[in-house]
Amino acid sequence: MLDEAIQRYGRRLYGLCRSLCPNPADAEDLYQDTWLRVLRSLDHYQPERDFMPWLTQICVNTYRSTLRRLARLPLLDFSSAEEQDRTLNAIPAPEQPDYSPLYDAVSKLPEKLRITVILFYFQDLDLTATANALQIPVGTVKSRLNKARKLLKEVLTDGTALPF
């Protein structure tokens, strides 16, 4: 049961973990901790309920527990509010990744591939939902995604213009 759940929901859960934790190592820890809690709580899962909302709830609660635990740890001891403000303002904001080359490359894909990529990756539809939206077989969705990934990989690693 758990292996099937990890196969089915693992990518989505990891995306949620990455959204909650900007640091990849923290996101991986949260991902692992969530699956451990799922394993411990599996006997409380009600099969008539959807699994993903239950999994999401466990992940968010795990994240909150981690934050509460970290908040109790005195990492920095400030003698005044001014010192705290000065120190915290001196910390540079994390740099946001620039995805514009990826978005540009996706926008230049052939329409069939572009729409499939947008539905699957950006709209977070699964293979079946993407196939239903496009009124094509699931195998065709897989094929288009594979072809799009190959094209995007070539373009983004070479830095050359899209050849189509």
Image (cartoon, rainbow, N blue to C red):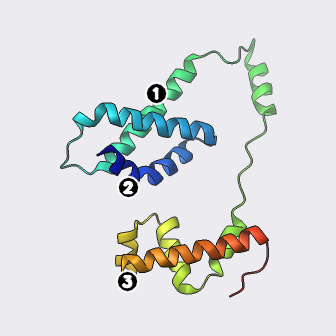
Q: Which residue sits at x=56%, y=46%?
A: 18
Q: Position of residue 34 (x, y in %)?
A: 43, 37
Based on the displayed image, in which of its 4 quarters is residue 84 positioned? top right
In three-dimensional space, the C-alpha distance between marks 1 and 3, rounded to whole angstroms, equals 43 Å
Dot label at residue 8 = 2
* Rendering quarter of residue 114: bottom right
Question: How far apart are the two marked residues, 2 and 1, measured between alpha carbons?
Answer: 25 Å
160 left or right of 10 in image: right
Q: Which residue does the image show at 43% across and 80% down from the upper left? A: 140
Secondary element at tag 1 = helix
First in sequence, mark 2 or 3: give its number. Answer: 2
- If you read the primary sequence from the N terminus, does the residue marked by circle 1 or circle 3 appear first? 1
State the mark number for residue 65.
Answer: 1
Which residue is found at the position 71% from the left and 51% from the top?
Answer: 96
Camera-side residue of 15 and 6: 6
Q: Earlier in the sequence, mark 2 or mark 1?
A: 2
In the image, is residue 137 above or below residue 59? below
- Residue density around tag 2, few if under 14, some if 14–19, many if 20 or more, within 10 Å: few
Q: Residue 63, percent across and down?
A: 48, 34
Looking at the image, is 154 positioned above or below residue 40?
below
* Mark number, residue 136: 3
Q: Position of residue 95 (x, y in %)?
A: 74, 48
